[in-house]
Amino acid sequence: MSAAEKRYFKRHFSSDKSLQTKLFDFINSMDEYEEDQVKEYFSDTNLAKNLKVYKVQLFDLLMKSLTSYHSKRNINSRIRIGLEEIEILIDKQLYNSALVRLKKIKELCLQHEAYSKLFQILEFENQFKVHYSINPLPPNDQLFAELEDAVTRTETAYRLQKILIELNSRKNAKGHRLLDEQEKQQYQRQLQELQDNYQLESMSLKEKSFWYQSVSCIYDLIDEEEQSYSYKLEALSLFENEPLKINSHSRLYFSALHNYLSCCNAMEKYPELTEGIQKIKALAKRFPYLHRNMTFIYYLETRYYYRQSKFRSLPGPLENDILKHIKQYDLEGEHISVSLFLHYTLIYLILGNAKRVQFYLRRLQNNTGKTPPVFSQTHGIIELISHYETGDYFIINNLLLSYKRKLKRELEYTPFFRRALEFFNQLGRVPKEEHAQLAQELLGELPEYSEDGVCRLLSGLHLENWLLAVNNNQGFTDWMADKCVE
């Protein structure tokens, strides 16, 4: 709880005579919750014997306080609480007051295109016409038309959302693989269906957002980057042109902004990227429930600094925020977290900080098996690189022997990973002065593995920089020293 939330609880929901309040004060004074300390402190009361019951009661009281404190702070809350107030007024038979409140809530729903919330409002309108009027009237055609419109818009939004989820799933599975002609034609047909079956002029913001993002995703799949960018920009503009609706569609805005920033990152539109990152951070601060998704933004920010060779800018506040965020939301084994660990391992290799390299290698090792094999194989190669840089050839040899035992039965090892193991084997069999030639050969072969998942991950981490260092008979840190941008 924030300091303001605690003050509100103490002012409106606490009592000096209440054990729940005393329990709250004691727990609030603790640096870290220790149940034995709580029982000892309240040993002279019934609370010690029934602590579980008192904790449940305190939790319920805190939720009431938080609900009251945050009431009507966003559109969905205002609508929900407004509907509850209407029910109370009806129960009290204050029908005129309930009808006035109902009209206001309905206007709010229409203003923010909260069509899924209209169902209960229209049901209330029906009750007023049929049950609460002095001269009951049958529901008129307009009521049914409004209900049908709300149902249609809600159904269309969910249908487009389902299409978008399926397209994103296919895009993730595709990776960097090129589509064959038949697959391209399939997506072109789906694109045509989206354009033929939906009329943008009559669609709500939610429908338009899913439509634009679905179209942009198809262009991603068929590798038409500029077209994808234009539709992602259109999806973002929906909210930029109607900022009032960000309040009721903040998750959609976050999604549109993230997709746009991912495209900016891929297309190296860095001014747009840095401006957008500040926007999305402000959005997450404004709507705390969005904060869990900030891992993706931290990744984009890390990639930006990494691609700009601003390696010295990464250790510090951003890294601390990332590690704190991963711990707070238990994201240790997520793909995006592992990808961040891979980046920071390379960053500290570049900066020559062996201790931090080992810190991230351990975290990567702990996540082996939680992510697809390409991540663990990429981690394996980076681990070999780190030991090569520190001259730990004995450890390299032991690792290679371990992989050698697995090679025949491990079918998930990619061709490039096998080639990398062969490369490190060769390094161990020839004099140091011949390493440059081996590195040059592998550099020349990289295009052959452009579709290989491990090679793609390492290319994103600029593996060629390390190979160039070996090719020039230099340590990685020395080679990158004049390439690091402040």
Image (cartoon, rainbow, N blue to C red):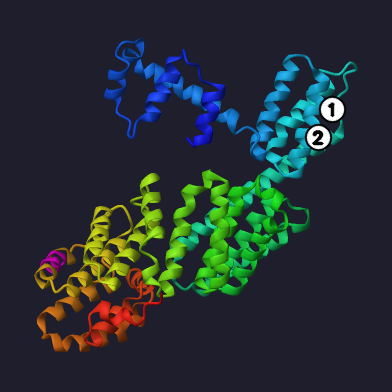
Between the C-alphas of marks 1 and 2, the distance is 8 Å
* Type of amino acid at the residue the image marks with label 1: Pro
Task: Reply yes or no: does residue 399 show up in magenta.
Answer: yes
Q: Position of residue 110 (x, y in %)?
A: 76, 42
Q: Position of residue 202 (x, y in %)?
A: 78, 53
Report which residue position mark 1 lands on: 139
Secondary structure of the residue carrying numbered label 2 = helix
Magenta range: 398-404
Answer whether residue 228 is visible to the viewer in this image. Answer: yes
Q: Which mark is residue 173?
A: none
Residue furthest right as drawn: 135
User: Mark 1 and 2 residues: CB-CB less than 8 Å, in contact?
Assistant: yes
Report which residue position mark 2 lands on: 144
Question: Residue at 71% across / 49% down in the picture?
Answer: 244
Q: Is residue 162 above or below residue 150?
A: below
Q: In the image, 308: left or right of 211?
A: left
Q: In the image, 409: left or right of 25?
A: left
Question: Residue at 57% across / 22% down in the picture?
Answer: 12
Question: Residue at 61% across / 64% down in the picture?
Answer: 232
Task: Please identify the dominant SS of the magenta region.
Answer: helix
Q: In the image, 124: left or right of 449?
A: right
Question: Residue at 54% across / 67% down in the picture?
Answer: 273
